[in-house]
Amino acid sequence: DTGVSQDPRHKITKRGQNVTFRCDPISEHNRLYWYRQTLGQGPEFLTYFQNEAQLEKSRLLSDRFSAERPKGSFSTLEIQRTEQGDSAMYLCASSLVVEVETQYFGPGTRLLVL
Amino acid sequence: AQKVTQAQTEISVVEKEDVTLDCVYETRDTTYYLFWYKQPPSGELVFLIRRNSFDEQNEISGRYSWNFQKSTSSFNFTITASQVVDSAVYFCALSVSSNDYKLSFGAGTTVTVRA
């Protein structure tokens, strides 16, 4: 059973550019979560999906952020007009509805906005 | 609201020493889950353990052990006979059903094991 995968692992961009990250959950996991982790802090919840439905978005997720999970499998997180404050590790996790409390994380995408 | 506090920012030990990581949590829910995750330098969060609020039995897995005490709202983690490969950031986390199991993390404790 392969784990959660994320692509790219690292992204360097200039302020004002758009970036998109991809997350592939563990096969058959219905739930998919996005978290953001800044240096020296624990991950913070951004948004999550059950199948293709986006159930909640954190107040941390400004209008420049959008996430999709079109077919209930992989998910994308897009940041428009990036700002230096967006520099962080973006983590994806997945879980089964029948074991929804346990989330398994991917390796993360480390974003640096110059 | 849920809150997790890891008061220790950094711990440095010499190989073979034991190290205990503290975790204190806050929630008004009676049903909740507690977790420990390990984050090595590569960045991936590795799931270590899950405990639910109704199971206060301590658990041992190899060199790892966990002490859950509801009376003090603590869920501490001990690494026995530490090894260099244990060097990582360790996060304690909490989820509750009323918040649909979204994880609330502590700030993490960086463990450095010196040879």
Image: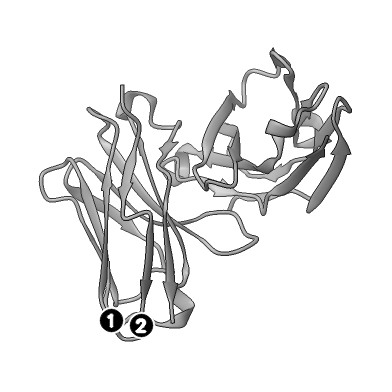
How many other residues sit within 10 Å of disc 1, few (<14), some (14-19) or many (≥20)? Answer: few
- Which residue corresponds to mark 1? A17
Query: Are tags 2 and 1 found on a single chain?
Result: yes
Q: Position of residue A1 (x, y in %)?
A: 31, 21
Name the amino acid, label 1: Gln
In front of the other: B37 or B26: B37
Q: Residue A110 vs residue B79: left or right?
A: left
How many other residues sit within 10 Å of disc 2, few (<14), some (14-19) or many (≥20)? Answer: some
In front of the other: A10 or A94: A10
Q: In terms of secondary structure, where does tag 2 sit?
A: loop
In which chain is the residue bearing label 1? A
- Which residue corresponds to mark 2? A14
Q: In terms of secondary structure, where does tag 1 sit?
A: loop
Toward which corner of the image does residue B53 lie, by quadrant? top right
Q: Residue B70 vs residue B91: left or right?
A: right
Q: Position of residue B47 (x, y in %)?
A: 53, 31
> Which residue is outermost to the bottom?
A16
Name the amino acid, label 2: Lys
In front of the other: A19 or A104: A19
Q: Residue at x 58, y 41 (%)?
A: B94
Toward which corner of the image does residue B12 lie, by quadrant? top right
Q: Residue B115 vs residue B56: left or right?
A: right
Q: Position of residue B65 (x, y in %)?
A: 74, 20
Quadrant of the drawing holding the C terminus of chain A: bottom left
Q: Residue at x 84, y 32 (%)?
A: B19
Q: Is residue B112 visible?
A: yes
Q: Are marks 2 and 1 in contact (CB under 8 Å)?
A: yes
* Residue A77 drawn above or below residue A33: below
In which chain is the residue bearing label 2? A
Q: Residue at x 42, y 69 (%)?
A: A59
